[in-house]
Amino acid sequence: MVHLLVTGGLGFLGLQTARHFLKVGRLWNPVLQMKAPLSKITLFDVGFPSEDLPSDVVEDERVRVVTGDLREPGVTDEIIDDPDTSVIHLASMVSGDTEAKPEDGWKVNVEGQRLLLDSLSKRAPGARFLFTSSTACLGPVADDSAAPDDYTKLLPQNTYGFHKAVCELMLNDYSRRGLVDGRALRLPVIVVRPGVPNAALTGAWSTVVREPLAGRPCAVPVPLDVRMPVASYQVVVRAMEVMLNDIDAGELGADRTLMLPSLSVSAQDLMDAARKLASEHSLPFAAVQEKVSPSAERVVRGMGSRTDGSRATMLGVVGDESADSIVLSYIHDYVLPGGVGGSKKLFGV
Amino acid sequence: MVHLLVTGGLGFLGLQTARHFLKVGRLWNPVLQMKAPLSKITLFDVGFPSEDLPSDVVEDERVRVVTGDLREPGVTDEIIDDPDTSVIHLASMVSGDTEAKPEDGWKVNVEGQRLLLDSLSKRAPGARFLFTSSTACLGPVADDSAAPDDYTKLLPQNTYGFHKAVCELMLNDYSRRGLVDGRALRLPVIVVRPGVPNAALTGAWSTVVREPLAGRPCAVPVPLDVRMPVASYQVVVRAMEVMLNDIDAGELGADRTLMLPSLSVSAQDLMDAARKLASEHSLPFAAVQEKVSPSAERVVRGMGSRTDGSRATMLGVVGDESADSIVLSYIHDYVLPGGVGGSKKLFGV
């Protein structure tokens, strides 16, 4: 019997993660040193989203939902209530908010993880703890240089990336001291995000697929030809399973963070794949307009277009095949009837 | 008129730094954008050392000594009492203590710097802030791989190195946001330390020079043939002057830390140089014994024997010439009459 705690558990990625692990049904138990049936998932978040929660997840009897603030006394003890706990730590202030309020960001992103690790190491010593880091750690990458990999020095160019880099170092240290068995996945831009467009510049890589397929014309503030490292949410949740269930701590050594394998694609690439699939499935496809903001263009062009996830690949983490496969799996989940988003209750189209 | 605040100012390196800047007599003023006469040095530390303070430093009318705890309310405001302040931040829990008390280490090493930066950015916006980092950030380095340089990923193998790495990232972020003009020097093993032997394993590289020259037989817990990256304290204080007075922020770019140029030498190399100079200056030279502890040997052999300081060199930071030059400058300062340690008041032989 094993307990999985997912922080940020009521966000898009948190719910996808829960759905995936409910289906997988088992989790590595560090006490027993074997995989055991997953008996409980705690979805922890600061509050409920405005959309309804998806019934297939929250009505599963193994799922418990808890809301609160990690930094309030007693909260970490309430959610880590089992010595057989593993953690997927997704909770974080997003990049724009962190840049605007760096002191709050430090408290949520850095001190939040520290409190969680301290509590976990006391209540479930040696537990596996998976943190989602970000390619924002990497900093600027010239397109003619080698793609950054697991040996690249981190030079974050925003406060969010700085905090994520600190969290990676913190995980290495807690793991070295034997307090937790930490792991981190450094995520690229996640596509295709369902739901409503958000303010993130990298949201454009989702917008150009989601909006036209929903028959809604849209505009994006970045040029369609800029390439970014991207991965589908399906690849991310499967990678989390591999990280928690299949990779031995010894294989990670002193550096607990793996760069998730990514594809280097432009918004145009994704839009072209979506247009082709729309035609094959007789779906609508509305117009997308480039309304380039010079500052937005400068930011995304400075982010680096590729990453090298070969260490993760070597350890069994599988990336996406192509822009086509990414769009097709989104269509299956959120556009065609019968997908996970078919209930239209959460993040449906 | 410029004010220099030195935290950890009553330690060995702090007093050497103060002595050097009193002699140089001027400091870059970010408000005036020029070098200006140094009007005040504040030496801040947690308490007074057990030895007398050196009179040439503390009796200089420009020097103010303040003791206290950075984290007490009002303390940073008391010591940053001038908009023309620059800071050399040496205060830190040492490596062994940090490993033994990681939570205290986080408060002193990480939160301490954060408080100092927040206060400085409010009271002296854009001030230059020099932090002494450590090669403990680097982590293990195989001797057949390239020497780590300013592009090497940081993989600290102890909590002290983890905290120093976080402080480096923090300085980059505060500098990027324009709050301070941060700089850091990543220091190798500093030799030859005067005074009494300390518990640090890397202290052996000083012990084998200092003790025999003082006529005191001694034993060291590490093999004499292990090489480490070392620099003299004279090179360190001159590098601090170059960092604060001569290097433009634009030359540092997004990465504010420079690896100090170092020499890769064994304790044997330093001892041989000292024996030769002892004979030339008719000084005593007592016996040194190897009493190797297997755990100590493992630690120092895992630390990496070299660093590549070529970015610092390119920016005008000068390293040591040779083991001979390091030992000779120590002898001039602390063994022969008339040196800075000649008063025998502090750290004298």
Image (cartoon, coloured by chain):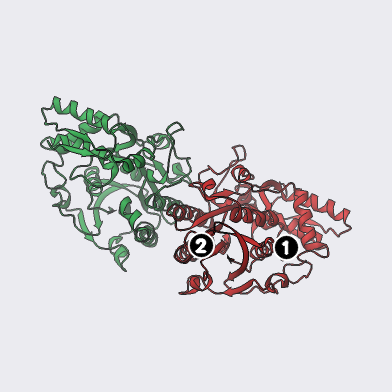
Chain colours: A green, B red
Q: Is residue B209 left or right of residue B13?
A: right
Residue B230 visible within the image: yes
Please state, as top left, top right, bottom left or bottom right, where the C terminus of chain B lies in the image.
bottom right
Q: Secondary structure at mark 1?
A: loop
Q: Is B4 situated left or right of A311 in this image?
A: right
Three-letter amino acid code at disc 1?
A: Pro
**Kind of residue at badge 2:** Asn
Drawn side of residue A209 relative to residue B142, left or right: left
Determine whether B275 is above or below A71 in the image: above
Question: Pointer 2: what residue?
Answer: B109
Name the quarter where the N terminus of chain B is drawn. Answer: bottom right
Indicate whether B330 appears above or below A185.
Answer: below
Q: Chain of mark 2?
A: B
Of residues A295 and B92, the one drawn nearer to the viewer in this rendering: A295
Label 1 sits on residue: B194
Q: Nearer the viewer, residue B74 or B157?
A: B74
Q: Residues within 10 Å of mark 1 (few under 14, many from 20)?
A: many
Judge by depth and name the residue closer to the eye, B138 or A19. Answer: B138
Secondary structure under badge 2?
Answer: helix
